[in-house]
Image (cartoon, rainbow, N blue to C red):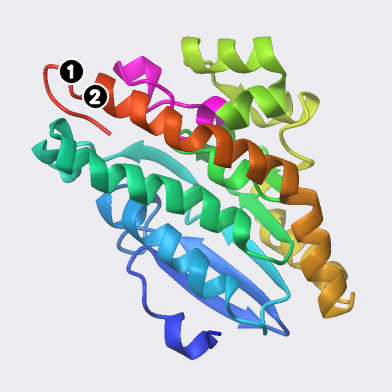
């Protein structure tokens, strides 16, 4: 078991607040919008373990900072070690833990996508309820458009959400979905002005939190069971293929 005070200020890329059992996790870099970097890649999986092991959490909200959810990536920050087997071994294990530990959080999760989610958008769209501002957009920018195999779970998530053909098109062409397109395709549940997003996320969280603790926990477990099986079957394989291709790049990226 874990307690909120033990992990609330533990992670440099996440700010956490909790009220009446509702935990809000806000991603950031130096108090600004999240830029995907080595620390967040390393930290999310560990944070999910702490969150999931705290029995006082009833609902979790994932939010971004400012006008962007995550629109940029710091390739250079991962270093040149990604072009080696030992370097990719770190990415492999962090990547597996990230999504599996996210899915292991045993309470309902709400994503509040406050702006463009172009980097690892699979994280918010794996939540049980996905809210988006009308300024949001969704893309898998860091992989195929940059010569990288989309193998770290995106190859499973996007075909699942969009359908096989639309999902493969999305990954291979670098397609960017507007908030309204994502709503029409079933990727998000509601779209609203950015200044209404946080209040709506908390409103829904408060509604969910009225249910008994075991109802909350086992509802989440039951509705994520199939996608967890999908991840167990294909996530490690996809990461291995991605790593093999990364090592063939002129300069390593992740």
- Which numbered tag is attached to residue 214? none
Q: In this picture, is 98 found above or below 134? A: below
Q: Quadrant of residue 192?
A: top right
Q: Is residue 28 left or right of residue 182?
A: left
Q: Secondary structure at mark 1?
A: loop
Count of marks, rendered view:
2
Does the image show residue 135? no
x and y percentages locating residue 174 in the rendered image:
47, 16
Q: In this picture, is 194 found above or below 247? A: below
Q: Is residue 122 left or right of residue 107?
A: left
Disc 2 versus disc 1: distance between alpha carbons? 5 Å
For image coordinates 32% across by 56% down, the residue present is 42
**Figure quadrant of the C terminus:** top left
* Residue 145 lies within the magenta run: yes
x and y percentages locating residue 229 in the rendered image:
65, 41
x and y percentages locating residue 159 in the rendered image:
64, 22
Q: In this picture, is 217 found above or below 79? A: below
Q: Quadrant of residue 110?
A: bottom right
For image coordinates 37% across by 20% down, the residue present is 149
For image coordinates 36% across by 61% down, the residue present is 43
- Which numbered tag is attached to residue 249? 1
Q: What is the magenta segment's predominant secondary structure?
A: loop
Q: In this picture, is 151 found above or below 172? A: below
**Label 1 Cα neighbours within 10 Å, binned few <14 / some 14-19 / many ≥20:** few
* Residues in magenta, as a range: 138-155
x and y percentages locating residue 20 in the rendered image:
73, 85
Closer-to-camera residue (100/80): 100
Q: Quadrant of residue 197?
A: bottom right
Asked if the residue at tag 1 contacts the one at tag 2, i.e. Cβ–Cβ closer than 8 Å, the answer is yes
- The residue pinned by badge 2 equals 246
* Residue 69 lies within the magenta run: no
Q: Secondary structure at mark 2?
A: helix
């Amino acid at each position: 078991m874990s307690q909120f005070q033990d992990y609330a200020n533990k992670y440099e890329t996440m700010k956490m607040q909790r009220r009446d059992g509702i935990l809000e996790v806000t991603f950031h870099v130096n108090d600004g919008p999240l830029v995907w970097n080595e620390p967040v890649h390393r930290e999310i999986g560990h944070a999910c373990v702490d969150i999931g092991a705290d029995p006082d959490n009833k609902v979790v909200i994932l939010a971004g900072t400012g006008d962007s959810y995550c629109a940029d990536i710091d390739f250079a920050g991962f270093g040149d070690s990604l072009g080696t087997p030992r370097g990719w071994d770190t990415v492999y294990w962090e990547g597996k833990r990230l999504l599996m530990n996210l899915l292991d959080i045993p309470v309902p999760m709400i994503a509040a996508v406050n702006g463009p989610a172009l980097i690892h958008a699979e994280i918010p769209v794996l939540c049980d309820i996905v809210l988006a501002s009308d300024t949001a957009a969704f893309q898998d920018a860091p992989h195929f458009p940059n010569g990288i195999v989309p193998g770290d779970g995106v190859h499973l998530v996007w075909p699942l959400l969009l359908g096989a053909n639309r999902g493969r098109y999305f990954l291979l062409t670098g397609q960017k979905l507007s908030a309204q397109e994502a709503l029409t395709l079933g990727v998000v549940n509601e779209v609203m002005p950015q200044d209404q997003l946080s209040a709506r996320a908390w409103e829904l969280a408060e509604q969910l939190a009225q249910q008994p603790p075991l109802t909350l926990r086992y509802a989440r477990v039951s509705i994520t069971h199939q996608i967890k099986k999908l991840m167990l079957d294909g996530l490690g394989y996809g990461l291995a293929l991605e790593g093999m291709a990364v090592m063939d790049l002129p300069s390593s990226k992740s």
